[in-house]
Each structure stands twice: as C-alpha cells, then as structure tokens.
Image (cartoon, grey):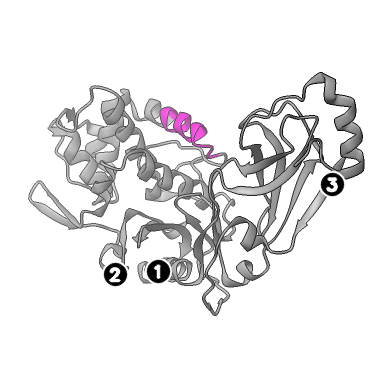
C-alpha cells in the first residue's frame, strides 16, 4: 500500500545547512520587464513581465554571436576567416563598426564589432558571410531559438534593427545568455573586452556595467525609441553567476542602475544551497520476500536551490513509496519519491533509488517469511 511519511527534520535527513541571518528585502524595478536568473540551474529568482513580448533591439546580437560561436566550435570556420562587406552591410545605420564596402574583414574583427561596438554593419556582414543572405541567417537564428526552448522569440534580422514580427522576451534572452556562456566558455571572453578600435576609430563597450559592477563580464545592451533601454547582464562572484535581463528603462543611467540593483539583490539576499547530494541516504525501508530485510533508498541526483533565509526556515518534505518493497530489487531503480516543498517555488520531486540489489528469498521459505513479516514486520531474522 502507498503511504506518506512526513519528515519533521528535513535538514537532518537530507543535508546539513548552516543558517545565517539575512534581512530579506522586497525587490522591485523601474524596468517594464525584468528577470533575474541563476546561471547554474536557470532558476528564476525574480521576474516582472518576463514572458511579455518585447522589441529586443541590439540584444538580438547575442543570438547572432551564438550562431557564429557554434560554427567556430563545430565546423572548420575560423576567427581568422575573412568576410566581404556588402553594400547592404555598409549602409546600415545606427551603431556602426565603420566597415568599408567591399573590404574583407576577419571574423574576429566582426565579432568584436558586434559585441563591443554593437555594430549593425558588422552584424549584417557576419550574417551574409555565414548564410549567404541576412534573411537566411535569421531563419537559422530561429532554428537555434527552438533548440534552446526560446518559445516566445522570432528573429527577422541579425542586428535587432526594428522590424515587424521581430520579438523576444527577457526570459528567453536570459535563457540564451546562459546557454552562450555554458556552450562556448572559451569564446565568451569577447564579451568582457572594454573597447575595440577598427578603421582608426576606438569605441568603448556599450555595457557600462563592466566598469561599474563587481564580477560583470557580459553581455549586451539594446535600445530603440519604441522599446526603451535594455540590457542582458551577468556577473560572477565567488563561483556563483547571476544573469539579469531588463527592458523598458528610460535612460542609459536607469538601465545601469536597475540592472545593478537586481544583480546585487540576488547575490546579497539569496543563497545557493545543496539540499541533497547524489546517492545520499534518505530512507531505509522493509523488503517483502527478499534475501535481505531492509533496503536503503538514496537520492538519484544532486539538488541545488537558491533560497532566501525565509525559504530556508520553512522547508518541508515528504517521502512517497510502497511499503514493503517487493523483491527482487534492482540497484539504481526508482522505488520512491522525495518531495520537497519550498515556499514560493514549485515542489521538487526527486527519484529515490535502491542502493543495491536484493534477490528473492528461497521459495521454500516464502510462506513462513510472509507470515512472520505480517506478525513481526520483517521478512527474515534480523
């Protein structure tokens, strides 16, 4: 039969957690859309209108770079390869790298032009180089979006130039930002460079947080008159990374302040805890008609969560399993669930698996063992 066993002392059973006082503060932002996401787990720590469609503006270029990085990593494409600058690329307005028409520019320079200078001309030149036309490149961008589960995103161009049906969400951009860092850690270093000179023109990185927020090493700003000022930013402190994406602020200063506030809040007011190690002992249960009387159920995975102090105080959990577990029992097979409840978050459901194999009892002893279990609660002498 199925039962629920309540764990009154979750922390003793599944982990050792050292509490320390945090005065948890409510957080809000002047940005119209915002999300704060943990890098390791993509766990959302704060959100405001995070899945409402926005004009991503130059934050679009994160996907342009993602596609290029994937080609560099997985094909014969090299950063030393050269791309021809078309008339279309040369004529692009807005932020520019100041490419010259018909010049051949290395992919290395184009990437720096896109990431550091937010060059629309560099974005188009790279797109045409990799896919023939910018339109075909945007189709490729959307293929990657689907692979990354960016469900509310559609790209029409490589630069973020205003276009009908070109949209994303701050949630999707955060997913993309984390994926780029995880998938291309060696190439990601481009995003931390603070200036780039091309054609004799030196331009600073548009991401002012590189100089003004501890641990910041990326990613990309964006602006159009209709969308306002936005940024995808990420910071690494003490081996923990936080990513935030905001949009709809009213100035570059507001964009910087709002992103800084959200990242600092995440580091200061939440903590990363290992709730459960992989293969950690959770519960010992009876075995029915087995050649051993007990079996230990252990966790199938490591569970890390980002919690406020209040959430740490009110953790609760229960175990769901069938008692007794009938032999034979196979090592690593699921025989129960540990359900951890965290206030304000979806329940965590962790599979509990057998620590080892348990065979069936000798058939001659089955009837005796069954009667003994019903009377004494064990299937064999202990």
Asked if disc 3 and disc 1 are in contact, CB closer than 8 Å, the reply is no
Q: Measure the alpha-carbon separation of dots 3 and 1.
A: 48 Å
Would you call the spot at circle 2 few (<14 residues within 10 Å), some (14-19), or many (20 or more)?
A: few
Mark 2 and mark 3 in contact (Cβ < 8 Å)? no
Q: Main secondary structure of the magenta part?
A: helix
Residue 142 part of the magenta segment: yes
Disc assigned to residue 3: 3
Taking depth in this image into account, of 56 and 90 the one nearest to the observer is 56
- Answer left or right for 29 relative to 237: right
Q: Which residue is mark 2?
A: 212
The image shows residue 260 at horizontal and vertical percentages of: 40, 69
| 3 vs 2, front mark | 3
Task: Return the residue at label 1.
Answer: 260
Check the picture and name the quadrant holding the C terminus.
top right
Tag 2 or tag 3, which sits nearer the N-term? 3
Task: State which region is magenta.
Answer: 139-150
């Amino acid at each position: 039969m199925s039962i629920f066993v309540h764990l009154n002392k979750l922390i003793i059973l599944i982990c050792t957690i050292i509490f320390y006082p945090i005065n948890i503060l409510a957080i809000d932002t002047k940005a119209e859309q915002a999300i704060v996401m943990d890098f390791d787990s993509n766990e959302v720590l704060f959100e405001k209108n995070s899945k409402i469609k926005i004009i991503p503006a130059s934050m679009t270029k994160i996907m342009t770079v993602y596609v290029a990085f994937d080609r560099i990593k997985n094909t014969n494409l090299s950063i030393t390869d050269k791309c021809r600058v078309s008339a279309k690329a040369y004529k692009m307005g807005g932020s520019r790298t100041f490419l010259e028409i018909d010049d051949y520019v290395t992919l290395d320079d184009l990437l720096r032009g896109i990431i550091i200078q937010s060059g629309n001309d560099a974005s188009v030149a790279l797109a045409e180089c990799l896919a023939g036309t910018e339109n075909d490149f945007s189709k490729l961008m959307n293929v990657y979006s689907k692979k990354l589960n960016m469900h509310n995103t559609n790209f029409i161009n490589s630069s973020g130039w205003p276009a009908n049906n070109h949209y994303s969400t701050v949630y999707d951009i955060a997913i993309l930002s984390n994926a780029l860092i995880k998938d291309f850690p060696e190439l990601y270093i481009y995003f931390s460079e603070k200036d780039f000179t091309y054609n004799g023109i030196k331009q600073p990185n548009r991401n002012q947080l590189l100089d003004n927020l501890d641990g910041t090493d990326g990613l990309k700003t964006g602006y159009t008159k209709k969308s306002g000022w936005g940024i995808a930013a990420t910071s690494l402190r003490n081996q923990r990374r936080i990513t935030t994406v905001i949009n709809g602020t009213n100035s570059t200063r507001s964009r910087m302040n709002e992103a800084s506030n959200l990242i600092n809040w995440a580091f200061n007011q939440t903590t990363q805890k290992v709730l459960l190690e992989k293969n950690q002992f959770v519960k010992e249960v009876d075995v029915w008609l087995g050649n051993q009387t007990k079996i230990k159920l252990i966790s199938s995975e490591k569970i890390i969560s980002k919690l406020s102090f209040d959430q740490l105080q009110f953790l609760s959990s229960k175990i769901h399993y069938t008692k007794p577990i009938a032999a034979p029992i196979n090592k690593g097979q699921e025989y129960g669930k540990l359900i951890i409840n965290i206030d304000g978050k979806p329940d965590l459901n962790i599979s509990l698996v057998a620590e080892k194999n348990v065979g069936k009892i000798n058939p001659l002893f089955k009837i005796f063992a069954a009667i003994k279990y019903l009377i004494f609660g064990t299937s064999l002498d202990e």
